[in-house]
């Protein structure tokens, strides 16, 4: 089937004149025929789905700000998921979550040790004062 270039009405392939508007369709190349798909049809096949941040990677990053351990675990899971799906954005997002979670874990452990030392030192001082 081809279409009239003047009124858009479907006309027979061998028709010379459009039965609807009477215009000549003799030289009308089928707009949806052989020539057009070479330019239009291959595009959807070559266009990869848009790379987006996965929900898991976003969740991991957000969680890493609040609870380092949970954020770290979710980010690692998101990173593995992103590697499977091949999403580079999700991988980088998950990496950020892992780094932030790991840093916070480190800070948390460090501050725990420091707090422990202060408490022990404080009790030690109290003990020393009690002896005196
Ligand atoms: Zn027509």
Image (cartoon, rainbow, N blue to C red):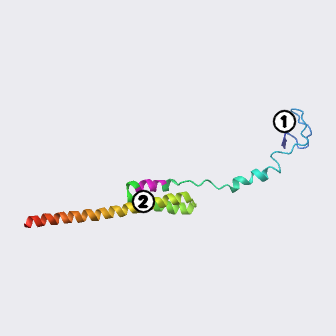
Point out the frontmost of discs 2 and 1: 2
Q: Is mark 1 within 8 Å of ligand 1?
A: yes
What predominant SS class does the magenta segment belong to? Answer: helix
Q: What stretch is highlighted in magenta?
A: 58-64
Mark 2 and mark 1: span between their CA atoms?
63 Å
**Relative height, residue 103 to residue 32 (above, below):** below
Toward the top, the furthest residue is 21
Residue identifier under label 1: 6
Residue identifier under label 2: 100
SS category of the residue bearing label 2 = helix
Work out which quarter of the rendered image holds the C terminus and state it.
bottom left
Residue at the spot 37% in from the left edge and 62% down from the top edge: 105
21 relative position to 104: left or right: right
Work out which quarter of the rendered image holds the N terminus and state it.
top right
Residue 91 % position (x, y): 52, 60
Which of these two is toward me, 31 or 100?
A: 100
SS category of the residue bearing label 1 = loop
Residue 44 % position (x, y): 70, 52
Q: Give the quadrant of residue 31.
A: top right
Q: Would residue 123 be counted in the magenta stretch?
A: no
């Amino acid at each position: 089937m081809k279409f009239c270039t003047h009124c858009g009405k479907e006309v027979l392939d061998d028709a010379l004149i459009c039965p609807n508007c009477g215009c000549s369709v003799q030289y009308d190349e089928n707009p949806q025929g052989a020539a057009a798909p070479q330019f239009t049809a291959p595009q959807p096949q070559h266009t990869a789905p848009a790379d987006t941040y996965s929900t898991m990677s976003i969740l991991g990053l957000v969680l890493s700000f609040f609870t380092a351990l949970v954020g770290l675990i979710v980010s690692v899971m998101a990173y593995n998921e992103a590697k499977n799906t091949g999403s580079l954005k999700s991988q980088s997002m998950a990496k950020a979550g892992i780094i932030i979670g790991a840093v916070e874990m480190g800070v948390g452990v460090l501050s725990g040790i420091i707090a422990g030392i202060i408490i022990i030192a404080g009790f030690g001082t109290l003990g020393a004062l009690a002896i005196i």
